[in-house]
Amino acid sequence: MVIEQLPKPVSRQPGPGELFQMLRDGAPRTRAELASVTGQARSTVATRIDMLMTAGLIVTVGEAHSTGGRPPAVFAFSPESRVVLAIDLGATHARMALTDLASNIIADSEDKLPIDLGPDKVLAWVCEKGDEMLAASGRGRRELVSVGVGLPGPVEFSSGRPINPPIMPGWDDADVAGRLGAHFDAPVLVDNDVNIMALGEHRSEWPDVSDLLFVKVATGIGSGIIADGSLRRGARGAAGDIGHIAVPGAEDTPCRCGNLGCLEAVAGSDAIARRLRQEGVEVSGSAQIVALVRSGDLSAARALRQAGRDVGTVLAACVSMLNPSMIVIGGSIAEAGEQLMAGIREVVYSRSLPLATQHLRVVASRARGEAAILGASALAIDHVLSAEAIDAALA
Amino acid sequence: MVIEQLPKPVSRQPGPGELFQMLRDGAPRTRAELASVTGQARSTVATRIDMLMTAGLIVTVGEAHSTGGRPPAVFAFSPESRVVLAIDLGATHARMALTDLASNIIADSEDKLPIDLGPDKVLAWVCEKGDEMLAASGRGRRELVSVGVGLPGPVEFSSGRPINPPIMPGWDDADVAGRLGAHFDAPVLVDNDVNIMALGEHRSEWPDVSDLLFVKVATGIGSGIIADGSLRRGARGAAGDIGHIAVPGAEDTPCRCGNLGCLEAVAGSDAIARRLRQEGVEVSGSAQIVALVRSGDLSAARALRQAGRDVGTVLAACVSMLNPSMIVIGGSIAEAGEQLMAGIREVVYSRSLPLATQHLRVVASRARGEAAILGASALAIDHVLSAEAIDAALA
């Protein structure tokens, strides 16, 4: 048999990106070692190393010992060569940071910025602030390779657009990625705030835990899923949205989403504050609740413990579903400490199957206030430093 | 700076496995094309092609046109060269199949075999049956490269051992992989039955759906999670175990697991039969329930619809959590048809967030009775045909 027409190769041709990933993840190497490890021809490796050097992504870090002749150069990843902009927009704040390609923070800022000003004003402010931070750090626009953004509402990750975000009036379907990308002339990755917190917490504190559930408890309640080492967003980027799962026995509590008995309507900070006001304790917002609990107020401690149990009821289902080895509790209400955690543990350990809880740890966030900004940075870096992205950039 | 001691390379040296994956997933290729696509040296490609030919994993399928001189050979994956044994053990049955490396069924069988005979008797029977099937198909033991097994209970995937399986007396911590591996002299992959059904359904019917939840409704209720294209097992292999998630309002129903109000205790076939018997309809087991519904019995139809709503209550939480684009309903009770599906859809679409349900499809299994055996075959094949496994085998 003679095949008349050979089909075009469909697989990606491995390029300099593969070499780069080895240097990014591992130890410095010589050309000869890279050729040996990859099976690529020596001449191919030499060409690709030159491309990566020219792009500033790798540097020589010294010379290997030689048994004679000129000692070979040793190459390593150079994270300082470029910067990314990490942006965490909340309901009322804007946290921003400039980081290098290893998520080291070069400059950062935190400002009051109500998200309900709408996308025009908020994004213009972000552009101006980003320019200021670049200028103040002495980094040019050309050194900025990508931007990572977290938003306080549902985002379709593939398009970088919010979808019917409940607390972001005017933002529905706004082209956040497109507008910021046009200004900064760089790719922009947009995700919801809980996903970037999960990513930041995972990368900075528990990189070796392959199945981790990060839970944010604040005004809203949500989660980010790390499964087999990667963030899982589901089909439309809505995975982890546990705030609107029904809590048994709470069917008479209306939620802003239009349904009844949602977790967020029962255990979010507004719900906790409402419960405390019914007991005569005047309080509103996460910060006041946390302060009350820390001051030793018994009503507040009880309310936090109950909120923990309600969160635990939903997390018990999540544990059965996902079998994580770690649940990390973050968000402003988690700052109140052990009462919330105790309530969560109480229900999770009693309500899930033994196989799923035998080695399960429920811990408080370590990255805390840094989680979101570190996650936005990681999101931006991963996008430009993947082997495919490097190949495309240097093609 | 001179680096005194260069660290050893830690990355895997890409070997013939990379070439093989290209031929397995794609079109037939010449040596020159493979060298061009992989960036490997021509001499390396030639050596590796020879190794894969000798191993019988690839064959020449013809010659490419040449502009002069001897036309170059074209190589392709040869799925017929080897076989795997796929084994699906249920509570009372043993389904087995011999397939080629593309999951084409060469021989299959179905027998009554109560799992509560214990691992000694059951595994001895499986070994004998496997030998018979190999002999009857004219395939030698040496052609068998791996074995995939599904068991009706929790399995720690990494060790291939059941863990406290409720309906498998005597099987706790039994070394299923080790015993079958010693007999068949091949690697053995063991997973729970729902995971292999999910894998089989996904591979055979919806390979392009990257986020899919497969739900089995029978005596037990469970699910298998496909996220970003792969089966996700969680930290200990227990992911997808939705049968013991609490159903709101069912707190007075005891479950065999020791908890109250579990989905399985409310909507599994035993629960449906019990409900029907309370209405005076004498029935037991999935088959009788399905027959009753198909005969037009209204009580049975009502019971199925309610079971669907109860399953839907838990699936609504799963949809919020995982955001799949497809839920596939399988298992013996699903054979009853639309009443179950209607109950599930009713609750899932009313109880989940719009973003998660906008493009969600809830469909009946297409692979049906073949899902488990196709999944066990896929599990076995993936293990021996991964690039890493090929490299190790040919090293």
Image: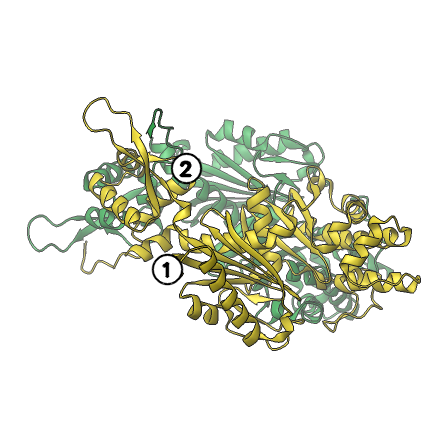
Chain colours: A green, B yellow
Tell me the quadrant of the picture where the C terminus of chain B can be found: bottom left
Distance from label 2 to label 1 (Cα)?
A: 27 Å
What residue sits right under mark 1 in the picture?
B142
Q: Is residue B254 left or right of residue B62?
A: right
Q: Secondary structure at mark 2?
A: loop
Q: Chain of mark 1?
A: B
Which residue is pictured at 58% across the width and 71% down the height? B163
Furthest residue toward top:
B67
Taking the image as drawn, is residue A337 in sight? Answer: yes
Measuring from the top left, give residue A117's x and y in whole percent: 68, 34
Q: Nearer the viewer, residue B280 or A363?
A: B280
Which residue is pictured at 65% across the width and 31% down the height? A173
Q: Nearer the viewer, residue A379 or B91?
A: B91
Q: Is residue A320 above or below residue B370?
A: below
Measuring from the top left, give residue B195's x and y in whole percent: 59, 57
Furthest residue toward left:
A68
Q: Secondary structure at mark 1?
A: helix
Which residue is pictured at 41% across the width and 63% down the height? B186
Q: Please tell me whether mark 2 or mark 1 is closer to you in this view.
A: 1
Taking the image as drawn, is residue A229 in sight? Answer: no
Q: Is residue A333 left or right of residue B345?
A: left
- What's the residue type where badge 2 is placed? Gly
Disc 1 crowd rating (10 Å Cα; few below 14, some 14-19, many 20+) is few
- What's the residue type where badge 1 is placed? Arg
